[in-house]
Structure formats: C-alpha cells, structure tokens
Amino acid sequence: MAGVASTRGGGPGPGGGIELTALERLGYDMFLEEAFRPYAARGFIPARVSIQHRKRFTLLSSSGELEGHVTGRFRHEASGEAEFPAVGDWVAAEIAPGENSARIHAILPRRGVLSRRMAGDAAREQILATNVNTLFIVTGLDGDFNVPRIERYIVIAALGGIDPVVILNKSDLAANVDEAVRLVRDAAPDVPVHTTCALTGEGISSLTEYLGSGKTGVLAGSSGTGKSTLINALVGKPVQAVREVDRKTDRGKHTTTRREMVLLAGRGIVIDTPGLREVHLWAAESLAAESFGDIESLAGQCRFNDCRHDTEPGCAVVGAIERGDVDRRRLENYRKLRAELRRLSQMKERRASPGKGRRPHGRGS
C-alpha cells in the first residue's frame, strides 16, 4: 500500500504496512472505524480534509491525495456552512473511477471542534477545525499581548472539548517575559504556558509533548503572532509563507489565507489558520462558565442569589477581589463573556424557526 500523501512538510513515509496504520497517523481510530462501518459496506473510503477551498476540498486517504467535492444531495440537505466539511473532518468518500477525485457523501462524527460565531450580526457558527486534540493559542509578546483575548480562546477550547495551551511567542521582543507569564497564569492557572521565539527556535521543543502520531494541534491567534513561523520551526524547514509585521502598528498581514493541515512526518499534525481579528463565542452560557469556575464557585457563596458582584453586601466575589485572591479584570472579563453569550442566545432564538432544530455533527447521506 502506498503511504498517505501529505500536503506539505513530508508525509508519514513509504507504505508497506496494513491500511489502518497509515490512517492512524492521520488520527483514525476505533471510534471512527465503527462510525464508518455503514459506509464501508457501500464501497466508500475514509479520508481526512486537509485543505478547505471555496467549493472543493483536498483529502488525505490510503489512496493518496484526492480532490473532493460534496454530492448534490449533501449540498441540498446541509442547512448551513457549519454542516459542510471543514479542515480536520473525517469523511466518507467515493473515489471516481480512473480519476484523482472523490465525492463526499458524509461527515463522520466530530470530536474536538474549534468554532466561533461568524463575524457580523448573524447567529451562525463557523467551524475553524475539527478532531483537534490541542489548541495552541499564539500571542506575540509585542503589541499583540492581550490577556482577555487569551481567555476567550481558552473558553472556546473548553467548549469544543480541546486542551488549550498558551504560546507566548516573540520572547526576544518582550520587555518582561516573566510578568507576561504571570498575568496569563493568574487568569488561567490550569492552562500550560510556554514562551517561544520561532525565529531562533527557543522553546519549540516544549510544544512537541502535545503532539505525536495521530494527534492534531491547531494554531490560532491574531495575524502577525508568528503561527506560520512556528509551524516552519516544528517541521524543520520553510513550508508556510511568512511576512514581516508592521513595526509602526505591531499588526501583521494575513499571510495564511486558508486553513491547512501540515503533517510532521510521524510526529503529529498541526493546522495553520488565518489570523482572527474577532473571537466571538458560539456556546451555551452555562458551558462557558466552566472556564471561570473560580468566580462561579465564589458566586455560590454570596449572600444573595441574584448578586451582581458589585456593591451588594455579603458578596463573596468582591471579598475575594479585595483580598487579592481574584484579579478585578478577571471579573470584568467574566461579565463581558456572560453578556455576549446572553446576546448570542437571544439571536439564536430569534433566528430559529418553529419545528426546526439544528442537526448534530456527523450527518451523512
């Protein structure tokens, strides 16, 4: 059997083993195999989406790299963009005889979904990547450093069932690296924090512990934080285009214009993403609260059940802030997230039509 083809960075090497071994390097496991069983009986093959183009997809499979497109039935039944394949998805594909193309009939159940509310006012979900194990939240230790934005990414990771890891890149430009690390750890004490310099390779080796054969990590953050440069450092050679950041504004340009999977030659998979200017949440309010468990726990100790954690007597949250146990900025961020999720819930209710519910991930023909 030929090895699974890679888009960039080198594939898993020549074949020779059983088919499942090659697919396992892409993250295929018994859970997916069981979900795929009905499609195997129809002569389809499992494949993973490595690049999402406008109306087509690059797929990786045991038959090599394929150009995929959804069937007419799939397109007709999809109720929105979130129900189309995304980078990281496993799909049931039918190879066209004598061609290097395939028809996508179904998406296998998703795990580890990174998504956000689409920019604008519409209450619609945008899938950024799926079947992700680790979200690398990349921020630059220059004008990009922003703790509230890091917290929002952590919430998104938790809601998607993904382990978050914070990467403070461009350590060579920081005036006080230790202070930046302290601020992040105060905001998210249970989340690993690593400092790196992608240009020199400093700290890159510490990221490999979150990867490995069959594991998928996705790098997300603003433009100009060095995501593509970090991927080049992980691969060991230039595979992603990079640009200089504007020194006057500390803003980067969108070097990466599409979400793309990069294989690390048996050491796992990373997904590069375009820089995000806005990080809108797509989740239930009750779930987002899990990322602010410290404040939620304190709120349960307040004298009044409807305490707003402002001037009310007997407020345990305000007491913790006065003692220095909780940063006041963390409470402010908690309030902003709560308010945004309430607005999102209202938008979803207005948009929903009677008798029509949202389809679960894992739809098919």
Image (cartoon, rainbow, N blue to C red):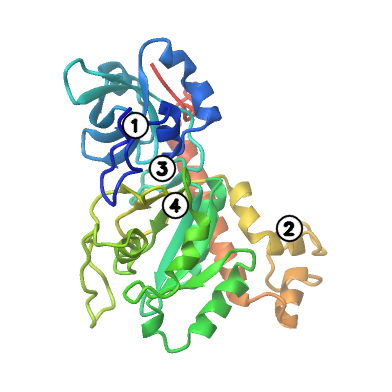
Q: In the picture, residue 122 is in which quadrant?
A: top left
Q: Nearer the viewer, residue 250 or 232?
A: 232
Query: Which residue type carries mark 3?
Result: Ala
Do tag 1 and tag 3 residues touch (Cβ < 8 Å)? Answer: no
Residue 59 visible at all: yes
Camera-nearest label, 4 or 2 = 4
Q: Is residue 325 left or right of residue 234?
A: right
Q: Residues within 10 Å of mark 1 (few under 14, many from 20)?
A: some
Of the image marks 1 and 3, the number of the one nearer the N terminus: 1
Question: Mark 2 belongs to which amino acid?
Answer: Asp
The CA span between labels 1 and 2 is 41 Å
Q: CA distance from mark 1 to mark 3?
A: 17 Å
| Label 3, residues with CA under 10 Å away: few <14, some 14-19, many ≥20 | many
Residue 294 coordinates in the image, percent (x, y)? 70, 64
Identify the secondary structure beneath mark 4: strand
Say which mark, if any, is on residue 123. Answer: 3
Q: Are marks 4 and 3 in contact (CB under 8 Å)?
A: no
The image's mark for residue 217 is 4
Identify which residue is drawn at 48% across, 50% down.
Answer: 212
**Which SS class for mark 1?**
loop
Of callouts 4 and 1, which one flags the residue occurring earlier in the amino acid sequence? 1
Q: Residue 52's quadrant in the figure?
A: top left
Q: Callout 4, which amino acid?
A: Gly
Quadrant of image for the C terminus: top left
Q: Is residue 203 above or below residue 5?
A: below
**Real-space CA distance between mark 4 and mark 3, rounded to the nearest whole angstrom:** 27 Å
Rendered residue at 52%/56% (across/down): 210
Q: Nearer the viewer, mark 1 or mark 2?
A: 1
Q: Are marks 1 and 2 in contact (CB under 8 Å)?
A: no
Residue where numbered disc 1 is placed: 84
